[in-house]
Amino acid sequence: MSLKLGAHDGGTLAVTDAAVSGTMTAPPRSISPTRRGTTDPRFEQIGRTPLTDDTSGRPPSVASFRVSTRSPLHVVVQGPSAPHGTLERLQACLRPGAATVRLPPGALHGDAFRLHDVSYDAADYARAEELASEASLDISPVPDDRHIDNLALFATDVDKTLIDGDFHAKLVELKGDPEADALAWREDIVESMRGRVATLAGIGMEDFHEVGDMMARRLMPGAREFIGMLSPQARVLLISSGFTQFVEKLRDELGAKHLHVHAHANRLLTTLAEAQTSIDEERFDDPALSLSSEASRVMSELLTGKMDGEFLDGNVKERLFRQYHAELPDDAHSAAMGDGENDIPMLAAAVELGGVGAAFRPRYGRHLPPSGVDVIEHSGYDALGNLFMGIEHRRRDTGQ
């Protein structure tokens, strides 16, 4: 596509590699409503929207905010490819007042641009969102003061977010009973999960870890790259409604290069049971080579079909995220990413606390995330990095 853009004054605007700050009217989705518990004067709360949460039966309230004053802001558009003319049409809608930067393409080698000093009204941004959706591009507002080096806490869901697949589903497919698993599904996520876990009873932990090793190699494209961009002091929080024994495997792998990785999930209970080995004394013709019946049995660790403690649902995810965030310095940023409805409370909390909440390839309608939650639907995991200023420089410095 062309790198010459039609500027709002009728001239041309060259794509450059440097950001320039300025002043513009921020869109409804660009929000940083609180800073360490105090209200940010740039934002005005307009209500709390009930969000149905099947995990508890209680309808938690999610705050919505709108921009009440002007502040520097830019817009990022990114995806597998930007069709010819799309960027120009987006620029016509958003009318950037300064240079447009081509960002590193990331793991999926697509197109990514940041339009600086955008000036527009809500109708303009809504039209830009429509254009981006038609072109399979993600679009997000980025405040001028949100910098990657200040990202001190990053929380991520695991299944279908950090890894490209669902561990529980793969375990059932390879080692469990798919028919029993299908019958265990319920509308209530907690009852459904407990029923599905019950069908895993009797599966050996050797088989569990075999599937775990397979799934741990299936990190989402861009996941390792994005985590590698974080400061060595940043905390990475793996928070999942899946199983601790698998999530800890991911924690240990990522923690080999990143010292502050924490894992929270549901711990499966196991039991030791006597199991017959594959060696059978009857196969030996020579009695001297035969093993006794007692010697041919070993103790095997098996899943009981039960979990230890409370189920890690959306409310627990939000609570854990807030606990970790409360330990951050005053000027630090936080972010959270997930794909499921049970991630929404955590994503909304990240936004409410002045950070980034991103719905990654969400398995629900785009209307469901509360105002301020970004949607990454077409790009790779590391697209989250482009929602922070300075990510392009960090990538150059690390050779990525």
Image: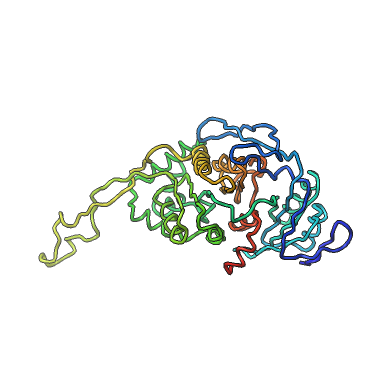
Residue 258's place in the image compared with 45, above or below, is: below
Residue farthest along the bottom direction in this orientation? 399
Give the side of residue 366 with respect to residue 341, left or right: right
Q: Dividing the picture into quarters, in which one does residue 147 lie? A: bottom right
Is residue 269 visible to us here? Answer: yes
Q: Dividing the picture into quarters, in which one does residue 43 lie? A: top right
Q: Position of residue 152 (x, y in %)?
A: 54, 51
Residue farthest along the left direction in this orientation? 288
Residue farthest along the right direction in this orientation? 10
Image quadrant holding the C terminus, namely: bottom right
Give the side of residue 357 with respect to residue 113, left or right: left
Q: In the image shown, does 390 or 278 lie closer to the viewer?
A: 390
Q: Residue at x 44, y 54 (%)?
A: 251
Residue 249's place in the image compared with 363, above or below, is: below
Residue farthest along the top direction in this orientation? 58
Q: How is the image coloured?
A: rainbow
Q: In the image shown, does 118 or 167 lie closer to the viewer?
A: 118
Image quadrant holding the N terminus, namely: bottom right
How many numbered marks appear? 0
Give the side of residue 153 with respect to residue 171, left or right: right
Q: Position of residue 105 (x, y in %)?
A: 65, 64
Q: Position of residue 255 (x, y in %)?
A: 44, 57
Is residue 184 visible to us here? Answer: no
Q: Position of residue 288 (x, y in %)?
A: 10, 66
